[in-house]
Structures are given as structure tokens and as C-alpha cells.
Image (cartoon, rainbow, N blue to C red):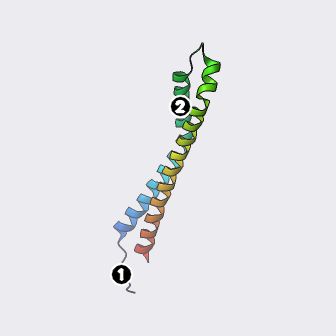
Amino acid sequence: MENKPLNKDNIIREVVKIFVGGVLALIVKVSSPIIITFVMTIANKILFNKHDAVSGATRYSNLIEKLTISLSFVSGIIIILILIYILVHLYRLYREVK
């Protein structure tokens, strides 16, 4: 193994990418419940009439439950992808410093 000089530009670039990935993961984690609530509010306003609230609630409750679960699943997958992105750049940083 050779002792090569450290390339400070690459190290700074990898640290910035790791930081940006962390900020993105935090934004997705914090905003996903807000987005889910917003979508559910819009879905409730579209699906339920004022006159037909009881039958609409029983008719569309399964649909709204599936929509909530799928939105949570999508936000979880986005967070997992961002964490993989962070791990890749941590490994590149480790390789650069090593």
C-alpha cells in the first residue's frame, strides 16, 4: 500500500455530500407526516360530501388507509435511499483518507 498525499478537495467534497445527504434525510423525516396529513385532508375534502359523511367514511376508509400506508412506505424508502447515499460517500471518504 502506498502512502499517497491527501487530496483536500476530494475530502471536502465527500464531507459536503455526506452533510447534504443528512440534511435531506432530516427534511424527509420531518416533512413526511406533514405531507401525509396534507394529502389526507385533501382526500377527505374530495371524497366526503357534507350530506354523505357517514356512508362516505365507511365507503372510502379502506382507500384512505391504503393511501396513508403507501405514503409512509414511500417516505421510508426515500430515507433508506438517502442513508445508502450517505454510506457510499462515507466509504469514499474513508478510502480517500486511508
Q: Is residue 40 left or right of residue 91?
A: right
Q: Earlier in the sequence, mark 2 or mark 1?
A: 1
Which residue is outermost to the top? 51
Identify the secondary structure beneath mark 1: loop
* Residue 76, percent from left and from top: 54, 49
Residue at 35% x, 72% y is 7
Query: Going 54% across and 37% down the picture, which residue do you hit?
Result: 67
Q: Residue furthest bottom?
A: 1
Q: Position of residue 46 (x, y in %)?
A: 51, 22
Residue 37 horizontal side relative to residue 21, left or right: right
Residue 77 horizontal/vertical position (percent): 50, 51
Q: The N terminus appears in which quarter of the rendering?
A: bottom left
- Mark 2 lies on a secondary structure that is helix
Q: Position of residue 10 (x, y in %)?
A: 36, 67
Q: Residue at x 44, y 65 (%)?
A: 88
Q: Which mark is residue 38?
A: 2
Which quarter of the image is occupied by the C terminus?
Answer: bottom left
Q: Nearer the viewer, residue 75 or 34?
A: 75
Seen at 36% across and 69% down, the residue is 8
58 w.r.t. 30: above or below: above
Q: Nearer the viewer, mark 2 or mark 1?
A: 2
Q: Disc 1 designates what residue?
A: 4
- Tell me the kind of residue under disc 1: Lys
